Image (cartoon, grey):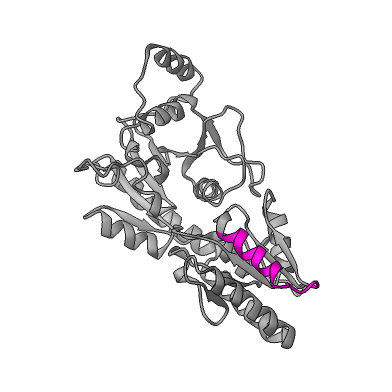
Amino acid sequence: MNTKIYFVCPNNKQATGGVKQIYRQVEILSKNGFNTCVLHEKIGKKEKWFDSAEIPIEYSPVLFKQLKYMFYKRKIKFIDQIKLFFLEKRSKKIEKNAILVLPEIYGDCIHRIEPSVKKVIFNQGCYLTFSGYSINKDYEVTPYNHTDTLATIVASHDAFNYLTFAFAQVNIQKITLGINDRIFNYSTGKQKQICFMPRKLTNDLTQVINILKQRGLKEDWKLVPIDNKSEKEVAEIMKKSIFFLNFNRCEGFGLPAVEAMACGCYIIGYHGQGGKEYFNPNFSSIIEDGNIIQYVQKIEEMIRLYDLNPEKILQKGKQASEFALSNYSLEIEEKQTVSVWKKIIEKHLK
């Protein structure tokens, strides 16, 4: 397909689910004959942690600088114009018949960048949709209802409901994110181990972990943080863990919990709204948002149950794995992604 699709990818020092899914979208579309690439700011940048074939990448430092100026409502001074001039010389020129795919984090700037180019919004965090908006302004035109926005793509039922409620008569398309079952899969090599992501809701996490220790967490149980790890390293920790602690608040989907389920973990924690579609009482425990005491009590309860009857809890983990891998497969993700993008391209070419 001739229409070039540029996925604008924010720079992150650490691997994040949002960036991983941008790479995944480009991987799927490239495999299926679409002309697409990741668009990074820093020349030479490539996420080395992404376990995949070669991903096409282009660079546009000028576009990211313009987005920054717009988002922070910075007045462009003469020195800024000079910077933009030289950055443009080093940047990929976006064709007028191309499609720019931008994440929701750029708020009300999305439709103003490259005004002659059609846009798609890849909204993975619906609760960040109104980042940069003012409560003292009326927004008749938004990136979501702008005539140059071809569609908004979301990855959860919660995000679909949020955006269709917030914006009347806009084109919202839902896809299902897939779990790489070659990496995230069930293992019988479980240990008395509890894993968690330490970068999410650190205040809540710190309270839960320290109260657990103060109350006397049994010495044969290990608490294992997952941070600065490759996909394979993350999966290895999850495969050895009995429980995964989920600390999400207002998330578009919350992929790590589903990856942990695929590895046979019993999930304890907040559903973060997006997780309501996969938190199942048969193999997970929902904690009321911010209820630290309930959180610790549930962990202690599940540890006691495991020590009394390990096979019962392991079976719940097996159920969780089967649910995750059947409902969030790479095949489903690819089929839905290709279908959605065929519709978008068809609309673009009309």
Q: How many numbered tags mark residues here?
A: 0
| Place of residue 260 in the rendered image (x, y in percent of width and height, measured from the top left) | 62, 66
Which residue is the extreme one toward the front?
214
Residue 202 shows up from this direction:
yes
- Identify the residue shown where x is 35% and y is 56%: 173
Tell me if 182 is positioned left or right of 1 in this view: right
The stretch of residues the image draws in magenta is 204-220
- Identify the residue shown where x is 54% and y is 60%: 255
Residue 216 lies in quadrant: bottom right
| Place of residue 295 in the rendered image (x, y in percent of width and height, measured from the top left) | 57, 71
Quadrant in which the C terminus appears:
top left
Nearest the viewer among 127 and 41 is 127
- Identify the residue shown where x is 54% and y is 49%: 31
**Is 169 located above or below residue 263 in the figure?**
above
Quadrant in which the N terminus appears:
top left
Most frequent secondary structure within the magenta stretch:
helix
Which residue is the extreme one toward the right?
220
| Place of residue 6 in the rendered image (x, y in percent of width and height, measured from the top left) | 45, 37
Residue 263 shows up from this direction:
no
| Place of residue 327 in the rendered image (x, y in percent of width and height, measured from the top left) | 51, 70
Tell me if 244 is positioned left or right of 72 in this view: right
Q: Is residue 147 magenta?
A: no
Nearest the viewer among 74 and 264 is 74
Nearest the viewer among 294 and 150 is 294
Q: Is residue 216 magenta?
A: yes
Tell me if 23 is positioned left or right of 244 in this view: left
**Is 112 located above or below residue 134 in the figure?**
above
Residue 178 lies in quadrant: bottom right
**Is 307 located above or below residue 58 in the figure?**
below
